[in-house]
Amino acid sequence: MREVPKDAEAKSHALALRAGLLFMASAGIYSYLPLGFAVLKKIEEIIRKHMNKAGACELFMSALQPIDIWQKTGRDKILEEVMIRFRDRRGRELCLGPTHEEMITEIVKKNVFSYRQLPLILYQIQTKFRDEPRPRFGLLRTCEFIMKDAYSFDATQEGLNVNYQKMLGAYQDIFKECGLNFIMTEADSGAMGGSLSHEFLVPAEIGEDMLYFCTKCNAYYKKEGKCPKCGTALLTKSMIEIGHIFQLGVKYSLAQGALFLDQEGKRQPAIMGCYGIGVSRLLPAIIETNSDDKGIIWPRGVSPFDATMVVVGDALLQEALALAHTLEKSGLTILVDERIESAGVKFNDALLLGSPYTIVIGKNYTASGKIEVEARKTREKVTLSPEELINFFNNERERNA
Ligand SMILES: Nc1ncnc2c1ncn2[C@@H]1O[C@H](COP(=O)(O)OP(=O)(O)OP(=O)(O)O)[C@@H](O)[C@H]1O
Ligand SMILES: [Mg+2]
Ligand SMILES: [Zn+2]
């Protein structure tokens, strides 16, 4: 889209709509179009890589959940307003899962009987449903969103501490690779009912959480009041919550009877932790903090393409495609803009879509054999031969490995 859509409520929302990442069906209800879905899959890949490396196992739970498992913990009442709940034609009371602590606890209760089966970390990347009072800012707060939720089960508190630290480390690696400049704070665990908890936040205007910032110490604080270190007055900063981890303890395992036999043969409740990432919320968080007036600037890790190739005029299309294939053989992913559009339109769209590089196959390519490459972030240009272009990207890759 050339124009900023009227219903866009934030910079990231406008860019996501203009770049064709999303389709808004209604407030808080979105479909992912091919480019948006491609970025989402890159983010999911990063999450899977670090979760698996930390020893977590992926599973996939049903979105439909029977209400009776929620009655065991009393959270059918606590989450009554956000829960999308209904009765099916056979009279079963069901909900579309707003989260999965109760479901995972049922699964572990029916499958884990001995300390020998512990510790265990299970995770999924799945759609959650919440009847949010104020869905807004594109994918920031929606009624249907994608979450990565992980759950750990341990025989001892020491075991939980180990798993908690593993997840905390994995989260730092995930957010770094997604190009997010995040802050980590210790937080209240509120409705989750446990003790220790950490929040991961990204400073951005549209954020709905608040932290206090000391410009002198370059540090964030949870509480207002002068800076505890230097006494300077603190600034308020809006933050986007991108992830939250909790030590749950035995609240769910006790309520639902998820017991295991310990080394002495005594029945004990499993000690749990839970670890969430707002996977779809990472898109607006990344775009808010990685964009300029021309469009999105995808961090390398989440960009579906290494470069967008702009072909000027259709006479050179075959040569351009041949070059793109050569680049793809060396492991690069190239988006070729083969539309019949003016060079200006294609070049502006390449800036809007935000691949780290734009490769321009200009009118004099056949005569000169030269290609122009522009970095999206710095807008620095270099002119290269096809062989030099391959080396250029190989060097780039090594630099960022
Ligand atoms: N309505 C939503 N739309 C998109 N992402 C969400 C939404 N609600 C929560 N998330 C994301 O899922 C993660 C884990 O969910 P959790 O239940 O801990 O969130 P929450 O405490 O309800 O978040 P919030 O305070 O933003 O409502 C959050 O850290 C956030 O990134
Ligand atoms: Mg919430
Ligand atoms: Zn200070």
Image (cartoon, helix red, strand yellow):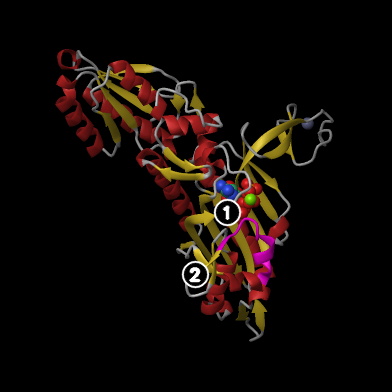
Give the camera-side residue of 19 and 390.
19
**Compared with residue 271, is residue 140 higher up or lower down, i.e. above or below?**
above
Residue 344 is left or right of residue 196, and the answer is: left
Report if the beta carbon of the residue with label 1 is closer than 8 angstroms to ligand 1: yes
- In primary-sequence order, the first of circles 1 and 2 is 2
Image depth: mark 1 or mark 2 in front: 2
Q: Residue furthest bottom?
A: 265
Name the quarter where the N terminus is drawn: top left
The kind of residue on which mark 1 rests is Arg
Mark 1: few/some/many CA within 10 Å (<14, 14-19, 20+) = many
**Compared with residue 305, is residue 193 higher up or lower down, i.e. above or below?**
below
Residue 167 in the magenta stretch? The answer is no
Read off the residue under disc 1.
Answer: 130
| Residue occupying the point 84% across, 30% down | 231
Name the secondary structure under disc 1.
Answer: loop
Q: Is residue 277 visible?
A: yes
Report which quarter residue 181 is drawn in.
top right
Q: For the magenta stretch, what is the residue range?
A: 73-85
Residue 75 in the magenta stretch? The answer is yes
Q: Position of residue 153 (x, y in %)?
A: 59, 68
Q: Position of residue 28 (x, y in %)?
A: 53, 44
Give the camera-side residue of 326 and 26.
26
- In what quadrant does ligand 3 lie? top right
The kind of residue on which mark 2 rests is Asp
**Compared with residue 373, is residue 168 higher up or lower down, i.e. above or below?**
below
Q: Is residue 169 visible?
A: no
* Dot label at residue 88: 2
Q: Position of residue 324 (x, y in %)?
A: 23, 31
| Residue occupying the point 19% across, 16% down | 365
Mark 2: few/some/many CA within 10 Å (<14, 14-19, 20+) = few
| Residue occupying the point 84% across, 33% down | 226
Q: Position of residue 192 (x, y in %)?
A: 68, 60
